[in-house]
Image (cartoon, rainbow, N blue to C red):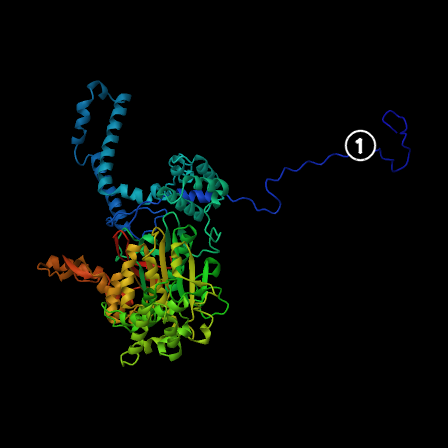
Amino acid sequence: MDSDGTQDARGTHANPVPRPAGPPAMPAVPPRPTEAPGVPPRPDGSAFLAWLRAPRPEAAPGVWRFGHRPRPDEEPEVIPGRQLIGGALIAFLVGWLIWSLLWNGYLGGWWLLPLYAMIPESWVEPHSFTAVVVVYAYYLVIALIIMVGVGRLGRWGDIWRRYGPPAWRQASRADERPPAPEEDPAAWPAVRAAGAADAAERLAAEARGGLMRDVDHARIARAWQGVRSGRHSLATFTGAVLKDGAAACLHPSGARDLPARLARHDLLTGQVRLGTTADDARNPYAYRGTGLGLGPELLGTSLLAVGPAGSGKTGSVVRPLAESLCLHALAGRAAVVVVGGAGAGLGPADAYDVVVRIGNPESVYDLDLYGGTTDPDEAAAVLAEALVGDLADPHPGSDSRRSTTVLAQLLGPFRAVHGRFPSVPELRQLLDGAAGPLDALRQGLAGSGQESMLRELDARARQMGHPGDVGGVLADRVALLDRPAFAGFFDTSGQSRPFSLKALDHPVRVRIDLPERGHADASRMLARLVLAQFSASVAVREDRSLFACLILDDASGVVTPEAVRGIQRLRSAHAGVVLTLRTLDDVPRPLRGPLLGAAGCRMALSGLTPWDGQDFAEVWGKEWTEARDVTDRQIIAETPAGKALHMLRRVITGKAPTARAVTVRQVERERWSASELAHAVPPGHAVLSLTSVQGEHAPPLLVDLRG
């Protein structure tokens, strides 16, 4: 029944008949998606912009410049905290005592004379408000004068700066607001100033949107350097940027980053962080506690690292440097060749463009035995260095000229007949003096008008009968490569994909795995071959703006007189090598000094032997230092009161009264002695000296490679 007493027309059932419902309500329309389904959200560009705008002040060689805060060259004199607080407390008590003596009149009323001289007599009336204000203001001035005086004596300002709010506040941060476009590196002001405003705006938008990485920035900056030097046109650069944005000017591999990074890199300065310089008294104060960073400006003088197995040569030095140079290659700045044993941990295969696994049938690439050259004399010189370079007289002036002549006498005629250089089995037969191959060459040259090649063969035939002929030694060394494990390698017929170090004109990343297990002698010979080819290839490059670097994870048996001369010439070719050794005993004694002199950067890792440390100590030289001689002399009392005082002092301190005499003198001492290098370098640390290509030096530094 309704409220007006009438019966409802729907009936009187317990469950009333529902009214027909109205039209269904339309559901709320969801917002339009900003990205396609399944696409992750775009990253924020704030991290990249913060990295790009971080301060990188100029610093000494080896200092990690990213966020670096320069320190003074000399260590400031720091008062110990206990002495500072004690002096401040004593100064406060002295000030309190002076004020108490003045207030209580023990020092007389002279200090009130200025007050009486300045105020008029009408203000001296008792209980005058003006008199009270003036008198207490005068008291306050006197108290402040005493406080300032004792505060200066007690160094209260130093306590405030060391323990007060200035020490609590964190270091001042840079202004988070983006700088002006003409000063913002993310706005590409140089590109904008050159008239390519559209390209600069596109790159700035990519940076703000989180689509640009550090490798992209370095790669595009390298391309812009090509525009400024005239290698590329501005229109080509602008078109590539407008089309691809941050992905413009890609590396031929199409990669924009490495699969993984283990070390910290700063591609804006080109540095990789290897560790932290220890806070040690033997390190210069400006270096203590700073990061250690290496870049092409230091590797261009070559690096030699010596340390026993397990000292961290591969994991702490070789792997970060190889990773850094691979990033430089992706940015178009460098070409790198990394040589080591199979499974040495030199980085994943995806981080390299070419991986040569010598002795592995699954290897996609082969190694060119002759370095890609077509000149028989050049090929003979490089091959002779690889085969018998370690057998040459180890003195710096020696060479393998006789072996080069023998190989040239065979390689020239063979190439003239076949149009290629001989394979390993063919070269072995020629060096052994087999009659069949030599006769075939002679028949091929007969009637061709190449009498000079025939004379070369005749000279080789005459020398075979001499007792001092080096052909037999060369044949024995070539036999190390003529093994079933290497049957598919060093092919010269053109059926394989040989890698040649002539490709170092391009930003290529190469890893060569040597078969150290079971073929140790062959591995050392191949390492010498790669080093010889590298030295010969980088010296004839047309474009030397590309930094080329060879990393040899184990250089045992690789250092020869010719190798040392090649390392000395690399700096002028904008190239360098990184060599690691377990001990300097792997280098002939006459070559140790020249090798340490040829390498501008020298590293001695923990666990070094004293005789190895002696070589490093000699090359690092000596320095003038301040020596302090302290002498304690016992004081003998003459009077009874003095004897009683001395007895009381001995009871309190437990020591006899002494007078200390300090003698300061300048002496010349070794920077690091052989004993310190052998016993005072903690595990995971190394002592490293640096030299840049500009000639700047850094003294031997104790570095924590784990920091």
Left or right position of 151 against 233: left
Number of dots carrying numbers:
1
**Residue placed furthest toward the left:** 638
Q: What residue type is labelled 1?
A: Gly
Can see residue 194? yes
Near-viewer residue (483 or 633):
483
Near-viewer residue (526 or 36):
526
Write the residue at 90% across / 28% down.
7
Write the residue at 87% across / 35% down.
17
Q: Quarter holding the C terminus? A: bottom left
Residue 344 picture location, percent across and down: 43, 66
**Residue placed furthest toward the front:** 447
Q: In this view, does 45 lie above or below 626?
A: above
Q: Is residue 583 above or below residue 190?
A: below
**SS assignment at label 1:** loop
Quarter of the view holding residue 477: bottom left
Near-viewer residue (699 or 238):
238
Q: Quarter holding the N terminus? A: top right
Residue 130 picture location, percent across and down: 27, 21
Residue 291 picture location, percent across and down: 34, 53
Residue 652 picture location, percent across and down: 22, 59
Near-viewer residue (700 or 584):
584
Q: How crowded is mark 1: few (under 14 residues within 10 Å), some or many (20 or more)?
A: few
Q: In this view, does 643 lie above or below 247?
A: below
Can see residue 384? no
Left or right position of 607 against 622: right
Write the residue at 61% across / 43% down.
36
Quarter of the view holding residue 549: bottom left
Left or right position of 521 against 131: right
User: Which residue in the protein does label 1 denote?
Assistant: 22
